[in-house]
Structure formats: C-alpha cells, structure tokens
Amino acid sequence: MKRKGQRISDHSEKIQNAHIGDSESNFYDVGIYGENTSMILRQAAQGDRKLLESVSKWLCKTMGYSLEVQDVGNGLYSLVVCGKEGSDNIIDVGYGISQVLLIVTQLFIEKGYRSDTSGAHLSKRKSVIFEQPEIHLHPAAQAQLADLFVDCVRNHEGAVKRILIETHSEHLIRKLQVLVADPDVDISNDQVAIYYADKDEYGDSYVEKMDLDENGQFEKSWPKGFFDRSYELTKMLMQANSKVSHQEKKDD
C-alpha cells in the first residue's frame, strides 16, 4: 500500500489574511507552502480552541509572542501576533514567525490537538517532511523545534510515526543529541537517523549515515565543514586579534 505523507517546503508563502467564508471548507493540513494555515487557525478559533491555544502557547514559550484570531470586518479575519510592546498583523511581522507558525500548526494537528481530525484521515498518514524548518529562526527557536519534533513522534495517539527533515542547522542537530542522551526523554539513539550529504573530490554527491550512541554522541567524526566551523572561525578571530596586538606593539 502506498505510504501517505505530508510535505512542507522551505519556500513557504508568507501567511495572509483570509476571508471568513474560506473557513467553511475543512483543511486537514497547512499545505505544501502553508497556504491553508490561516484558515485552519480560524476554524480552531471557532471550535474548541485547543489547537489555537496550543500553537499560541508554543510561540509564547519559544519566541515570546502569543497568537490571536481577530475579525477585522468586511468578511475578513486576521492572525494577530501579540508581544510585550503591542500586537501586529502577522503580515506585518518577520518572515520567521510565519515560517514556524505553519510548522507548529501542522505538528499540533498531527498530535491530535484538533477535534475534527480523527478517523480515516489520520489513520492513513505516516510521515511528515520538512525542508529546512530552521530558516529565519534564531538559534534558540531552532533547538526548540527538536523538542517538538520528538514530542510529536513519541505521541502514540497522534498520526505522525516518522518525520523527515532536511536541515543545515547545527542547533537542531545538537538538541537532538541532547534529547537522545537525556534519560527523562522517551527517545533512543536507534530512533534517530542522521544522514550527511556532501560531494567527493570528483564532485560526485554521496550520503553518509552518522550514527548516534546511547549518550547522544556521534560514533564517528563528523565530516569537516559543519560542526567544526564555529571552532575554526573562533581561531580566525583570535588570530586577527593577535595581528592587531602585534601591530600596536610594533607601532610603539
């Protein structure tokens, strides 16, 4: 039987306001480009609000913003992001919030935080695919996504059994290592598969599996150019400072 799955692209659309009439149709996912996100959250606001409140709580914990759905008249409603300094329509805030909002909304749908998504639809879905979910997010939010991914997969009452992520985020991978090592988190090293894609000296692409041990450590050294980059840049900074100091002494 063909495996069902949901893919969300890194080329997502910025979430827009929508017509109230749009919410009369049922959407079971945010769409590849996040085009259904605002309608889904509008439906949640009209229903038991569990989905909307869960998404808002995650945003508040991770990024310091809560989320509201407001009727702005003329058959329109808007998603409003609320922070300490006031509130803004989501179309007027940074792209990062729109990007993470569709990801978080989809995952909470899959976790069963929506009253109208039980039944055959959820029973068929097995995989969710995200392309570079870390885009436009600060490091802390990137790491926090790892917690949500693991929580979603480990929720046996939800629909997701597998999440496939294309990422360039060191913070996301490092947090996965921490979660594997943490005895209080219900995820083991054999439930996480990490693959590194690169090119060899001839320009041909290859994929290498990077296994984790029970302590969240990689069993073999990571290829150069990823985790070692921060260390290399720190050395370059120290060398640059050393040059300045040497030049100042020379001038004296």
Image: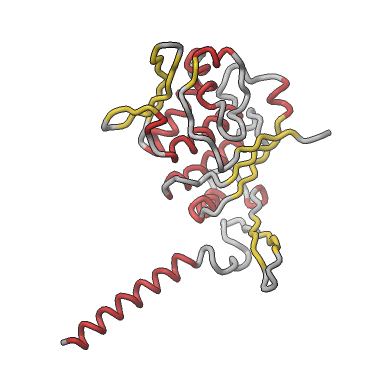
Task: Note whether residue 251 is visible.
Answer: yes
Q: Where is residue 242 in the image (x, y as percent from the top left)?
A: 30, 79
Q: Position of residue 18 (x, y in %)?
A: 49, 20
- In the rendered view, how is the structure colored? secondary structure
Q: Where is residue 32 in the image (x, y as percent from the top left)?
A: 61, 34
Q: In which quarter of the image is the C terminus?
A: bottom left
Residue 90 against residue 225 in the figure, above or below: above
Residue lying at 58% horizontally and 29% vertically, measured from the top left: 30
Residue lying at 39% horizontally and 33% vertically, measured from the top left: 60
Q: Which residue is at the front of the view, 97 or 106?
A: 97
Residue 94 against residue 73 in the figure, above or below: below
Taking the image as shown, residue 229 lies to the left or right of residue 70, namely right
Q: Which residue is at the front of the view, 225 or 90?
A: 90
Q: In which quarter of the image is the N terminus?
A: top right
Q: Which residue is at the front of the view, 156 or 106?
A: 106
Taking the image as shown, residue 117 lies to the left or right of residue 143, namely right
Residue placed farthest to the front in the image? 74
Q: How many marks?
A: 0
Residue 82 against residue 237 in the figure, above or below: above
Residue lying at 70% horizontally and 23% vertically, measured from the top left: 121
Task: Note whether residue 111 is visible.
Answer: no
Residue placed farthest to the left in the image? 252
Q: Where is residue 36 in the image (x, y as percent from the top left)?
A: 56, 26
